[in-house]
Amino acid sequence: MRSTILACVVVLAHGAAAQSGLPPTIDSSAKVVKLATLPKESYTVDQPFTEGATRDPATGDVYFVDQNSNKILKWSVSDKKLSLFMHPAGYANGMTFDQNGKLIACADERNQLWEISTNVTKSVPYPQPLNPNVGDRGTSGNIVLPEYKVIMDGKYNGKLLGGPNDVWSLPDNSLYFTDPYWSRKWWSPGRQSQQDVNTVYRVSPDRKTLTRALATFLTSDGKPGSPNGIISSPDGKTLYVAAYQGPGNGGGETYAYDVGANGVLSNRRLWAQFGSDGMTMDNQGNMYMCAPINGKSGITVVSIATGKQVGYIPVPETPANLAFGGVDQSTLYITAKTGFYSIQTKVKGGHPQK
Ligand SMILES: *[C@@H]1O[C@H](CO)[C@@H](O)[C@H](O)[C@H]1NC(C)=O
């Protein structure tokens, strides 16, 4: 009897230690390193806000945004340097690479999805901001930008979306994106979502059809949820969608769904009692979530099999997104407010683009 109680105490102490410490996938001597601090530009209304980290499967380079300054940036892993990839960039937010190697961005300014080439440029008339009082007005002449096209025009059934937030590409090259509503200063004043729910949408592989993948997106207490981070299992059969606010730990929840042959999501389960902004996974069955715990900023690492926490990576600023980058894909890159950070891991990313 006595020894059983002792064994319980040991297990509990071990579990508690794992929650605040680094996950087993990261060496205990590894450190979070700040690679870059984004500058505040004169035309912005807020401090930099980095987001949207995704890995170019062709090179291992990491692309991310500073949404407030309307820039897409590129971290070159070969020379360890940050460069400007695109500005203006439609106030891009969440991004991913699709199955054809194109960069897909939630271009929040006009609620669109853009498909952007990493290696072809084009001279175009300088894109003027939607809200003439906010943003870089540029020139009346032309600017050379990465070639891009609008693949989703910002409307569902003729009505404005809430604001595409994060996007994911499945193996069949369909795109799934979350559509919460967060009012933006660069929008036309007073703009509202015209949709009756904040939910998850699907763009067909041929990019011709936009459908709702979920009729509703409710948290486990039955209230309307705010869908945010989105990622699939490697085989594309399960989709994980995080609710940024909800009754779970730290104010969020994440659900798993089956992806049906018709692209519709079904069989919802509450997978983890953590929400997240952007999410990624390693190749050893762990999810890395931008979820605050006890008010401390960092990455919560969760076992995909159990939905339970296996560790925590403290980060000096609040992370909004992350991706395993580099040629061997073993470095975790983290976008957090004004900073761009990395930490070396003992694993590799679970998807070529994340
Ligand atoms: C441009 O990038 C795409 C996607 O990675 C690749 O398929 C294509 O070969 C590249 N083209 C050139 C000219 O490098």
Image: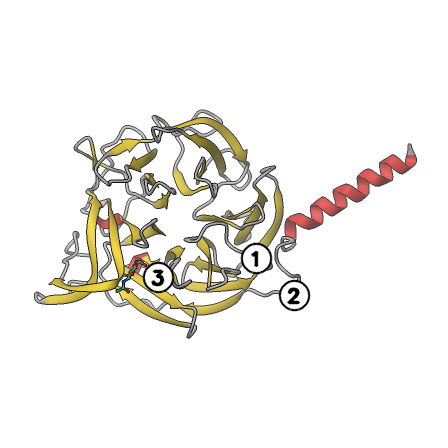
For label 3, the SS is loop
| Residue 259 image offset from top left, x and y in percent | 41, 32
**Left or right: 311 as drawn, with respect to 140:** right
Label 2 with label 3: CB-CB less than 8 Å: no
Q: Amino acid at mark 1?
A: Pro
The residue tagged 2 is 29
Q: Amino acid at mark 3?
A: Gln
Query: Measuring 28% from the left and 67% from the top, which residue is drawn there?
Result: 41
Q: Dot 1, crowdedness within 10 Å: few (<14), some or many (≥20)?
A: many
Dot 1 or dot 2: first in sequence order is 2
Query: Measuring 53% from the left and 52% from the top, which residue is drawn there?
Result: 299
Quarter of image, res 313:
bottom right
Give the distance between the C-alpha atoms of the residues marked 2 and 3, in whole angstroms: 32 Å
| Residue 340 image offset from top left, x and y in percent | 44, 64
For label 2, the SS is loop
Dot 2 or dot 3: first in sequence order is 2
Nearest-to-viewer mark from 1 and 3: 1
